[in-house]
Image (spheres, rainbow, N blue to C red):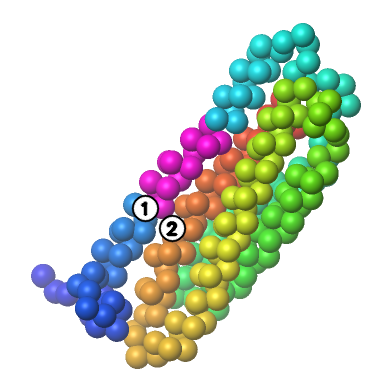
């Protein structure tokens, strides 16, 4: 069986390591899925609290009147988080098609949208539009979820920023490699899995908070 000259390129293997790019890519993809599966339990706790407390509605105080978070901020967060994931997936397709310029443009747009989502989510966390002390069980769940999602968006923004920043460095420093994208495509793909997960969390949260 012929060996792929790109995957056997010694420049693509770590010093003193026999881990091939194909194995490294598989490890990152599996790791990303395991991480998403574990992280999902954090948000499932809020989903359980939401459904349980809403069904219990003790003394009719699940959601007192005038406990309405900003719909505008909610829409902006939804659009930017989902848009960031979509831009990243499109950028990954361009990267795999051998279009590094389109990859950098798409990844840059994804990073910008994620940064906007993080700022807006932080704003909503600091100013939810109501007093958490008089917002019943809904207010407690909302504030806790908003703070948790904000921390996740901060982490996602940092993760994506490191990938985007490393893209140009790999192309400059690894000119002898046939396909420099193989150096960062696995990590970008792993982030893409996480970005889709966050987009799914945001869609479910928007429906429950603003539409249900």
Q: Quadrant of the N terminus?
A: bottom left
Q: Which residues are magenta?
A: 32-44
Task: Tell me how many marks there are.
Answer: 2
Q: Is residue 132 left or right of residue 104?
A: right
Front-lying residue, 99 or 151: 151
Query: Residue 134's quadrant in the figure?
Result: top right
Camera-near label (1 vs 2) is 1
Front-lying residue, 203 or 91: 203
Q: Earlier in the sequence, mark 1 or mark 2?
A: 1
Q: Is residue 40 magenta?
A: yes
Mark 1 sits on what residue?
A: 31
**Magenta-colored segment: predominant secondary structure:** helix
Mark 2 sits on what residue?
A: 190
Q: Is residue 73 left or right of residue 45?
A: right
Whole-angstrom CA distance, mark 1 to mark 2, is 8 Å
Find the residue positioned furthest to the left: 1
Residue at left offset 78%, top offset 11% = 60
Q: Quick check: marks 1 and 2 in contact, CB under 8 Å?
A: yes
Check the image and report above or below for 79 versus 205. Answer: below
The spot of residue 119 in percent (x, y) is 74, 56
The spot of residue 17 in percent (x, y) is 22, 74
The spot of residue 172 in percent (x, y) is 47, 89
Confirm whether residue 90 shows in the render: no
Query: Residue 209's quadrant in the figure?
Result: top right
Find the residue positioned furthest to the front: 133
Q: Quadrant of the C terminus?
A: top right
Residue at left offset 59%, top offset 50% = 152
């Amino acid at each position: 069986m012929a060996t792929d000259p790109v995957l056997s390129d010694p420049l693509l293997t770590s010093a003193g390591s026999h881990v091939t790019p194909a194995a490294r890519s598989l490890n990152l993809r599996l790791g990303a899925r395991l991480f998403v599966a574990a992280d999902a339990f954090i948000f499932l706790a809020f989903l359980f609290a939401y459904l349980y407390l809403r069904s219990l509605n003790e003394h009719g105080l699940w959601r007192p009147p005038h406990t309405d978070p900003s719909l505008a901020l909610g829409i902006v967060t939804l659009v930017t988080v989902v848009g960031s994931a979509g831009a990243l997936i499109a950028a990954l397709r361009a990267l795999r098609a051998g279009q590094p310029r389109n990859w950098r443009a798409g990844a840059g747009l994804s990073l910008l949208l994620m940064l906007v989502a993080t700022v807006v989510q932080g704003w909503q966390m600091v100013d939810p539009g109501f007093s958490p002390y008089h917002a019943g069980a809904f207010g407690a769940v909302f504030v806790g979820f908003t703070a948790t999602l904000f921390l996740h968006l901060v982490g996602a923004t940092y993760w994506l920023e490191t990938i985007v920043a490393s893209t140009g460095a790999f192309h400059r420093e690894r000119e002898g490699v046939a396909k420099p994208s193989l150096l960062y495509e696995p990590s970008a793909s792993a982030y893409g899995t996480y970005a889709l997960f966050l987009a799914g969390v945001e869609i479910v949260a928007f429906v429950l908070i603003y539409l249900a």
